[in-house]
């Protein structure tokens, strides 16, 4: 006969179980509210800009870039597109492909103009110029 092995039991009181359930419920509610806020913000962008699916996807790709602030113009942003060996940086690869395929290497999306430098080394983002 083999001795019966008992699984380790953790003493969880009813109060601890209730607190864990309450915590999980609060976390779920927080996540759902955050998701609702993001959906509302996206709807606002769609209403204000009139953007369609393709522009939204482009915006998602371009906004995912880790933009650095310009030194002379606070509204100007830039990022490295290529390393010193001329290879496209992996974290901006999609953005570089988008801009290389765009006429003149520029895209106007939302509030910004996105551009690839003439030599392909830098990505630029600056406020879109409005027609007067």
Image (cartoon, rainbow, N blue to C red):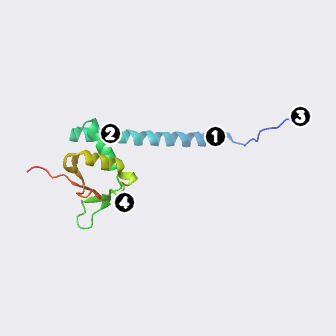
Q: Residue furthest bottom?
A: 72
**Of callouts 4 and 2, which one flags the residue occurring earlier in the amino acid sequence?**
2
Distance of mark 1 from mark 4, alpha carbons? 53 Å
Q: Are marks 3 and 4 in contact (CB under 8 Å)?
A: no
**Of callouts 1 and 4, which one flags the residue occurring earlier in the amino acid sequence?**
1
Q: Determine which residue is flagged by label 2.
A: 40
Q: Which mark is residue 17?
A: 1
| Residue 62 appears in the rendering | no
- Name the one closer to the observer, 71 or 45: 71
| Residue 119 in picture, x, y percent from top left | 25, 58
Q: Are marks 2 and 3 in contact (CB under 8 Å)?
A: no
* Residue found at x 27% / y 67%: 71
Distance of mark 2 from mark 3, alpha carbons? 62 Å
Q: Are marks 1 and 4 in contact (CB under 8 Å)?
A: no
Q: Secondary structure at mark 4?
A: loop
| Residue 8 in picture, x, y percent from top left | 76, 42
* Residue found at x 34% / y 47%: 94
**Of callouts 3 and 1, which one flags the residue occurring earlier in the amino acid sequence?**
3
Q: Secondary structure at mark 1?
A: helix
Q: Which mark is residue 2?
A: 3
Distance of mark 3 from mark 4, alpha carbons? 66 Å
Q: Secondary structure at mark 3?
A: loop
Q: Determine whether, in the image, residue 26 is placed left or right of residue 96.
A: right
């Amino acid at each position: 006969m083999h001795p019966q092995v008992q699984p380790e039991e953790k003493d969880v009181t009813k109060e601890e179980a209730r607190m864990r359930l309450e915590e999980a419920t609060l976390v779920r509610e927080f996540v759902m509210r955050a998701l609702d806020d993001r959906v509302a913000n996206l709807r606002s962008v769609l209403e204000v800009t009139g953007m369609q699916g393709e522009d939204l996807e482009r915006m998602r790709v371009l906004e995912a870039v880790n933009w650095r602030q310009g030194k002379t113009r606070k509204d100007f942003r830039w990022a490295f597109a290529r390393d010193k060996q001329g290879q496209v940086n992996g974290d901006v690869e999609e953005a570089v492909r988008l801009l290389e395929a765009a006429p003149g290497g520029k895209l106007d999306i939302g509030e910004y103009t996105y551009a690839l430098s003439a030599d392909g080394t830098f990505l630029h983002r600056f406020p879109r110029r409005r027609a007067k």
